[in-house]
């Protein structure tokens, strides 16, 4: 095994030990003490968010002097993402839950800020009002930066609205405290994205018209937009994600003949699509590695542990050497300088609760641990696993073993992921690690319908909510019970979002299988969910067509939606139920759990309902994560 040469930055040289005075919910529910680690274009500065102790700040540090050169209170904007656009300018993308004037209820609104390190000033880049349409939630996007590094280009709905959204324009915004944005390119209601050329001029725009189902790409020529590609599809099958370094081709991800998402290019001269350039039979190209101007350097592949390919052969060999020589770890590229001489990695596995390392070519410099209160011996072992479902389909899975096993047959937590078209990653997942600390084996099946394992695996889940997707969970329990690894009489099913649906479906449709069930921000009434989406987006929106394909409601109608909704089968439920839901959840409305709780109480079922005030769909705050874990701990102590 390759030996890591690690030098510690003097600001972070003390390896923290666990604070024994904290409870398990407080330890595992806490947010990462260090996160969002980014490096400047020159590689001479890093920025990161730290929530250590009572602080919550964004820090900018000079690596040569090892001194802090700038800091701001992170609570002021609560950033979810940050990156450098120059040595002295840092972009912070934040999300807040607030009222939009003139619109009913509260909404999650993303906003971009610029932090001027030299001037110690923070400014918001686009503000609703003053031509910027009030009723939009996505004002945090930046699609490019001017060559002089003084302006950023940001798409936004501009103007007033009547029966439909106003035009989606590209705005030019100066990187200063109180910028006055001006229109850089005029759009219309069908435009969804922009790309700029080397001079920062509007170059390419992508469109999707919900009324005609037309997906198209246009190129700017002689001050006119010329269409080079168009197809009519119920929703977009091709994802345009960047530009090649010469800006002559648009980068496109879509499914190839091998059933895997692959990397293609589209000529901006005539719309001709290339043969696949990055493609593997064992993994999907799930994202591209690109800079702030969306120039693509390489790709990231799907898999429990990430892997990469780059156009630069030396860089490609370097990254493959690092990952290949230490396969027991998961290496995620967090950031890099403009020449790729310095790369920030996030590493997990074998006793690591998450470490940020800076690779400078010959050595790794330790930046900091993401979770200081969890020592190596308390990090539960995670392995990749596979079993065969009852119809012969291979199901990949992750198993997290108890930190201190008391029996050979472990009590278990079935933990299906959300999505459902997503998948779990190898590494430190706070919820799984919490359960392992409490003595449970945690089972995370990548049931049919999960992404990352090929188109056939995804399509096998279409129309199988509450059916074969649920059978895959049951088969995992039976398989591990036959292997003698778990006690089938002591299994609790826990999930969030779609995983919360799977938890309630497990309790309703296989009532003798689970000893208890916990739903976090979960769906219980599929029919109501689609009705709410229709009210939100309209009957003709692609979101409804997508759900029609995934769930199967288009062909089978309301009867299917009712049949797969656990709320209609509460009489079958035998296991105690814990419902946890964020009151500010805009993805799965709080009413999904509220109405399910009413139905369970009407049937005199054993149900506990926890309302998380001001919390969103993702349990983003430490306070409510801890509150949720405290409720889970009390529930499991009583019923498991």
Image (tube, rainbow, N blue to C red):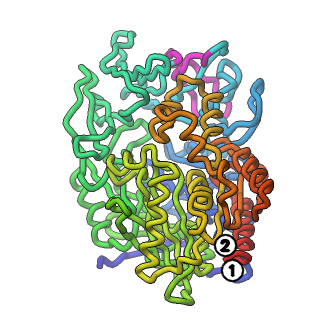
Q: Nearer the viewer, mark 1 or mark 2?
A: 2
Res 599 seen here: yes
For the image, the number of numbered tags is 2
- Quadrant containing the N terminus is bottom left
The residue lying at 56 percent from left, 45 percent from top is 90
Q: Is residue 314 above or below residue 398?
A: above
What secondary structure is found at the residue carrying circle 2? helix
Query: Picture coordinates of residue 573 (x, y %)?
Result: 66, 61
Q: Nearer the viewer, residue 449 or 401?
A: 449
Query: Picture coordinates of residue 179 (x, y %)?
Result: 64, 28
Q: Which residue is mark 2?
A: 27
Q: Is residue 207 above or below residue 413?
A: above
Q: Is residue 397 above or below residue 16?
A: above
- Quadrant containing the C terminus is bottom right
Query: Picture coordinates of residue 327 (x, y %)?
Result: 33, 71
Q: Is-magenta flag for residue 554?
A: no
Q: Which residue is mark 1?
A: 19
The residue lying at 49 percent from left, 35 percent from top is 556
Q: Is residue 278 left or right of residue 435?
A: left
Q: Where are the magenta residues, as a range? A: 164-189
């Amino acid at each position: 095994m390759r030996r890591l040469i690690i030098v510690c930055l003097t600001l972070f040289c003390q390896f923290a030990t666990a604070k024994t005075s904290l409870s398990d919910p407080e330890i595992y529910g806490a947010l990462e003490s260090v996160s969002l680690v980014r490096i400047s274009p020159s590689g001479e500065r890093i920025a990161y968010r730290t929530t250590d102790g009572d602080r919550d700040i964004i820090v900018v540090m000079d690596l040569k002097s090892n001194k802090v050169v700038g800091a701001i209170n992170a609570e002021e904007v609560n950033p979810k993402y940050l990156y450098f656009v120059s040595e002295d300018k840092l972009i912070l993308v934040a999300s807040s839950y607030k009222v939009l004037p003139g619109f009913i209820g509260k909404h999650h609104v993303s906003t971009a800020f610029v932090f001027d390190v030299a001037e110690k000033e923070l400014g918001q880049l686009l503000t609703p009002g003053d031509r910027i349409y009030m009723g939009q939630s996505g004002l945090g996007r930046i699609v490019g930066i001017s060559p002089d590094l003084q302006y950023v280009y940001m798409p936004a709905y501009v103007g007033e609205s009547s029966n439909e959204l106003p035009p989606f324009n590209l705005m030019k915004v100066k990187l200063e405290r109180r910028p006055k944005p001006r229109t850089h390119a005029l759009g219309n209601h069908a435009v969804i994205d922009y790309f700029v050329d080397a001079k920062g001029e509007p170059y390419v725009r992508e469109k999707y018209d919900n009324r005609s189902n037309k997906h198209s790409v246009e190129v700017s020529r002689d001050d006119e937009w010329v269409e080079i590609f168009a197809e009519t599809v119920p929703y977009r099958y091709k994802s345009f994600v960047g530009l090649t370094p010469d800006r002559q081709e648009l980068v496109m991800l879509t499914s190839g003949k091998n059933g895997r998402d692959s990397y293609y290019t589209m000529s901006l001269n005539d719309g001709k699509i290339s043969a696949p350039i990055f493609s593997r039979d064992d993994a999907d190209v799930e994202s591209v590695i690109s800079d702030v101007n969306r120039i693509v350097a390489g790709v990231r592949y799907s898999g429990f542990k990430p892997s990469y390919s780059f156009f630069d052969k030396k860089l490609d060999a370097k990254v493959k050497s690092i990952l290949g020589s230490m396969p027991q770890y998961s290496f995620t590229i967090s950031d890099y300088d403009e020449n790729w001489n310095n790369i920030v990695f996030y590493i997990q596995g074998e006793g690591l609760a998450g470490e940020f390392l800076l690779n400078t070519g010959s050595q790794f410099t330790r930046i900091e641990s993401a979770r200081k209160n969890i020592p190596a011996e308390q990090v539960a072992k995670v392995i990749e696993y596979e079993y065969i479902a009852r119809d012969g389909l291979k199901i990949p899975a992750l198993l997290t073993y108890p930190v201190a096993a008391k029996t050979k047959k472990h009590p278990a937590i079935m933990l299906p992921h959300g999505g459902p078209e997503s998948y779990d990653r190898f590494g430190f997942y706070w919820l799984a690690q919490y359960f392992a600390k409490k003595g449970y084996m945690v089972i995370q099946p990548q049931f049919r319908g999960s992404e990352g394992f090929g188109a056939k695996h995804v399509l096998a889940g279409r129309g199988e909510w509450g059916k074969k997707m649920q059978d895959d969970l049951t088969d995992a329990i039976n398989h591990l019970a036959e292997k003698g690894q778990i006690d089938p009489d002591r299994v609790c099913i826990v999930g969030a979002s779609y995983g919360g649906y799977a938890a309630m479906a497990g309790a309703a449709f296989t009532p003798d299988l689970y000893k208890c069930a916990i739903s976090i921000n979960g769906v219980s009434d599929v029919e109501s969910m689609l009705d709410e989406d229709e009210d939100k987006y309209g009957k003709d929106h692609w979101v409804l067509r997508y759900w029609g394909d995934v769930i199967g409601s288009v062909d089978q109608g309301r009867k299917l939606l009712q049949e797969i909704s656990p709320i209609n089968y509460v009489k079958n439920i035998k296991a105690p139920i814990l419902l946890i839901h964020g009151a500010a959840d805009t993805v799965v409305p709080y009413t999904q759990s509220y109405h399910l709780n009413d139905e369970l109480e009407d049937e005199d079922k054993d149900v506990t309902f926890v309302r998380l005030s001001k919390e969103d769909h993702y349990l983003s705050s430490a306070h409510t994560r801890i509150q949720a874990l405290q409720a889970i701990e009390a529930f499991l102590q009583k019923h498991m």
